Image (spheres, grey):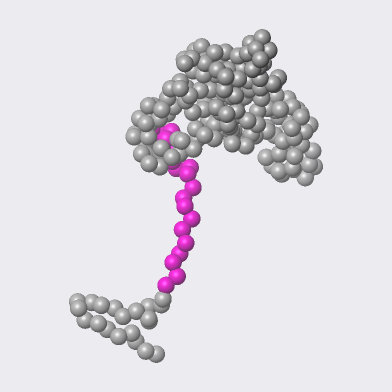
């Protein structure tokens, strides 16, 4: 089934009749979009276009919601400007997916903060200096850990998320190592060593 292109203006009672959705909710083929793409719940989807080789979602962050500064973690709502981020997402229906997300740049009103302006981040969707969504980034890291460079690049190509093997290895090197706990054991004086079948008692002080 091919996803049709809808926008907010095209959602009207005449479109669905008595089962028309509430204003401000975008439906695709009778399915509410946040149910299909839950990581887009915190943003406002403007339109979805699946007529080309890739599914393109146009979305924007909400105007009145405050954002947390990336420098001092204090929330601010003084908007400086807007710009569009181009995010690659996981494939949907075998088609690559791209999110054109309009985000705000805000002023930080904390005089002790070194940042004058900062770009807002959407939890679970964006990350600083990242052109992939968090879902796709988790997939790339998992594939890199399991298959490394060449095998990981082949699998990502089959998943409609092509990535060079050098990039897969680069993302693999960014994965933090698991925290290991140093085992606590008995001292050497409490062991009885066994060598060539001969038991040596522990030395007494």
Residue 127 rendering spot, x and y as whole percentages: 59, 35
| Along the viewing direction, whichever of 84 and 60 lies nearer the viewer | 60
Q: Does 174 appear in magenta?
A: yes
Residue found farthest to the top:
14
Whether residue 74 is visible here, answered yes or no, is yes
| Along the viewing direction, whichever of 136 and 16 lies nearer the viewer | 16
Q: Which residues are magenta?
A: 165-185
Q: Residue at x 29, y 78 (%)?
A: 193
Q: Residue at x 51, y 11 (%)?
A: 51
Give the left or right position of residue 27, taking residue 139 as reference. Answer: right
Give the left or right position of residue 161, taking residue 85 as reference. Answer: left
Above or below, 8 against 70 in this view is: above
Q: Quadrant of residue 25?
A: top right
The C terminus - image quarter? bottom left
Q: How many marks?
A: 0
Give the left or right position of residue 41, taking residue 62 as reference. Answer: left
Residue 90 rendering spot, x and y as whole percentages: 49, 28
Residue 27 rendering spot, x and y as whole percentages: 60, 20
Q: Quadrant of residue 204?
A: bottom left
Q: Residue at x 31, y 80 (%)?
A: 192
Residue 136 rendering spot, x and y as whole percentages: 49, 32
């Amino acid at each position: 089934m091919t996803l049709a292109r809808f926008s907010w203006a095209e959602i009207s009672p005449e479109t669905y009749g008595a089962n028309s959705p509430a204003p401000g909710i975008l439906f695709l083929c009778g399915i509410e979009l946040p149910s299909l793409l839950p990581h887009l719940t915190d943003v406002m989807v403007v339109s979805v276009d699946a007529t080309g080789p890739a599914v393109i979602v146009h979305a924007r962050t909400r105007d009145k919601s405050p954002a947390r500064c990336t420098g001092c973690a204090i929330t601010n709502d003084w908007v400086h400007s807007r710009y569009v981020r181009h995010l690659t997402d996981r494939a949907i229906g075998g088609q690559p997916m791209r999110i054109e997300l309009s985000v705000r740049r805000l002023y930080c009103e904390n005089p002790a903060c070194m940042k004058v302006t900062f770009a807002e981040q959407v939890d679970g969707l964006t990350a600083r200096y990242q052109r992939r969504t968090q879902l796709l980034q988790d997939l790339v890291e998992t594939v890199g850990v399991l298959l490394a460079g060449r095998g990981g690049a082949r699998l990502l190509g089959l998943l409609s998320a092509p990535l060079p093997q050098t990039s897969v290895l680069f993302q693999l090197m960014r994965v933090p190592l698991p925290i290991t706990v140093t085992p606590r054991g008995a001292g050497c004086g409490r062991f009885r060593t066994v060598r060539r079948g001969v038991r040596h008692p522990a030395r007494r002080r």
